[in-house]
Image (spheres, helix red, strand yellow):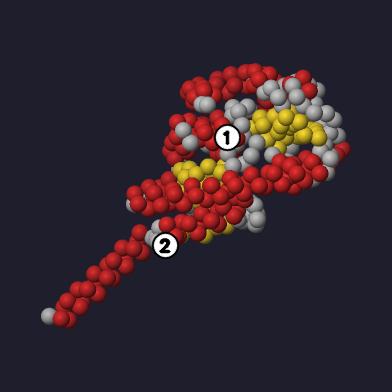
Amino acid sequence: MFQNITKSLVGAAAVAVMAVTANAADWRGWNIHTDGYPNTIAMDKFAELLAEKTGGEVTLQMFHGGTLGSQPDAVEQVRAGALEVGNFNLGPIGPIVAEANVVSLPFIFKDVPHMFRVLESEGGAAIAEGMAAKGLKPLAWYDAGARSFYNGEKPINTPADVEGMKVRVMNNDLFTGMIAELGGNPSPMAFAEVYQALKTGVVDGAENNWPSYESTGHFEVAGYYSLSQHLIIPECICVNTAAFDALSADMQAAVTEAAQESAILQRELWAAREAASREAVEAGGVVVNEVADKGPFQDAMAPVYEAYFETNPSLRSLVELIQATE
């Protein structure tokens, strides 16, 4: 009888171990950024918190520096479940998820705090729902700063200051339309070509965030930085929707909590990185100016928005919701 009880206990323990093993999830994650970058540090923290909060039932092996492919490729891999996790900018997600594309509308956000208030309210829930339906469930939002104009000629304070200026932008109809409506000449080109283009006068100016402006040396050949903050496009921790849905409710809560705690760290690190970059370029002689009134810039975007609504009529209410968020 004792032997039967022992066998029963051993059998039950084996079943329990098998159940834990079956429920365990060994995830792989993609990140384009390199060692030391705020997102890289935060994603490693996410992996650490994930194992801690799930008791090891969900683990994450991060692959940084884009080693598993380009961002568009990685987005598709996460959607398909070939990868479970990605730290993505919402820009490349926009063509896949209509709701996510609204964050690429110029001047849709007043500033970075406004962007986070939107993402953490009804507007963000609508964006998240649209993303999850396409296989990309956002667990937390990361800061990617605000993009502003810079050039080698003069401060930009009004749309008139952009007139006639050749400005490098990313290859996106929304961004080329933005420059055109301000009276400038949009010049899409690869990011790696911008420094030489600024230096030789192929373009007069460009636009980007503080760390990119500083780390690429663009400030050396474009010494005026104007805080227009015309594009504020966040990043996310995205998980494959099916992989997340396969977890128990308790595990889902633990995974989400880990992601959101890592976002707190990322935002702190990003703020410090931005401050250091700004300090460095100002020490290098860059002239920085605040755009006191963004109203004329926003008004100039009306044709860009109307063209957007012609192909995305169902998103007008979401855009209006975002604009109405205080």
Q: Is residue 137 visible?
A: yes
Q: Splitting the image into 4 quarters, where does residue 160 fall?
A: top right
The part of the image, by quadrant, that contains residue 190 is top right
Which labelled disc corresponds to residue 113?
A: 1
Give the residue at the far right of this rendering: 200
Measured along the vertical axis of the image, is residue 182 above or below residue 140? above
Disc 1 secondary structure class = helix
- For the residues marked 1 and 2, what is the alpha-carbon distance in whole angstroms? 34 Å
**x, y percentage for residue 72?**
58, 44
Horizontal arrangement in the rendering, residue 78 relative to residue 150 (left or right): left
Q: Residue at x 27, y 67 (%)?
A: 15
- Amino acid type assigned to the residue bearing label 1 in the image: Pro
The quadrant of the rendering that contains the N terminus is: bottom left
Q: Residue at x 27, y 70 (%)?
A: 13
Q: Nearer the viewer, mark 1 or mark 2?
A: 1
Q: Which tag, 1 or 2, sits closer to the chain's start?
A: 2
Task: State the image coordinates of residue 110 (x, y, percent, origin top left).
Answer: 60, 28
Amino acid type indicated by mark 2: Gly
**Residue on which the image places disc 2:** 56
Give the SS element for disc 2: loop
Residue drawn at the location 66% of the way across and 30% of the way down: 230
- Residue furthest toward the left? 1
